[in-house]
Image (spheres, rainbow, N blue to C red):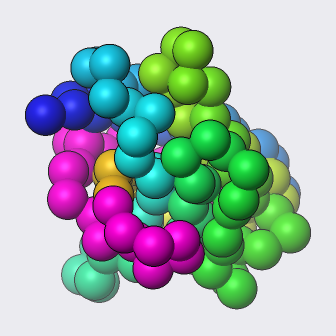
Amino acid sequence: QVQLVESGGGLVQAGGSLRVSCAASGRTFKNYAVGWFGQAPGKEREFAASVSWGGGSTDYADSVKGRFTISRDNAKNLVYLQMNSLKPEDTAVYYCATGVGNWPYIRYINWGQGTQVTVSS
């Protein structure tokens, strides 16, 4: 089973940028799609972005499209979420997850512990 560890969260002012990372263990990481999800206090976990196995395809929630960019480096077992033009409503714990299925209909099966992103107004 792939183990996932998120990092890079923090406090940033509105309009600022942050890059969060997801480090994976295991040689099979390249066989999985990877998604990023955000969970704000008192709310359900919501999809933000996903990237396909080789990184050639991406998908974004409408709320982050044009501001967030997901990418992966399979040689380093890393997935990144570059977050630009951040808004206070982006404040959440961000989780990465590995998934299976037919792109872009991915079923996420393995989750990290999350990293907190706080955007101040």
12 over 85 or under it: above or below: above
Which span of residues is magenta-colored?
Answer: 100-121
Image quadrant of residue 61?
bottom right
Looking at the image, which is closer to me, 32 or 70?
A: 32
At 24% from the left and 42% from the top, the residue drawn is 112
**Residue 113 drawn at (x, y percent):** 21, 42
**Residue 71 drawn at (x, y percent):** 68, 41
Q: Look at the image and tell me whether residue 18 can be seen.
A: yes
Decide whether residue 107 is among the magenta residues: yes
Quadrant in which the N terminus is drawn: top left
Q: How many discs appear?
A: 0
At 86% from the left and 69% from the top, the residue drawn is 66
**Left or right: where 119 falls relative to 58:** left
34 over 29 or under it: above or below: below
At 58% from the left and 64% from the top, the residue drawn is 49
At 37% from the left and 69% from the top, the residue drawn is 101
120 over 107 or under it: above or below: above
Q: Look at the image and tell me whether residue 11 can be seen.
A: no
Residue extending farthest left: 1
67 over 63 or under it: above or below: above
Residue extending farthest top: 76
Looking at the image, which is closer to me, 13 or 17?
A: 17
Quadrant in which the C terminus is drawn: bottom right
**Residue 19 drawn at (x, y percent):** 65, 36
What secondary structure predominates along the stretch shown in magenta? strand
**Residue 89 drawn at (x, y percent):** 58, 75
Decide whether residue 69 is among the magenta residues: no
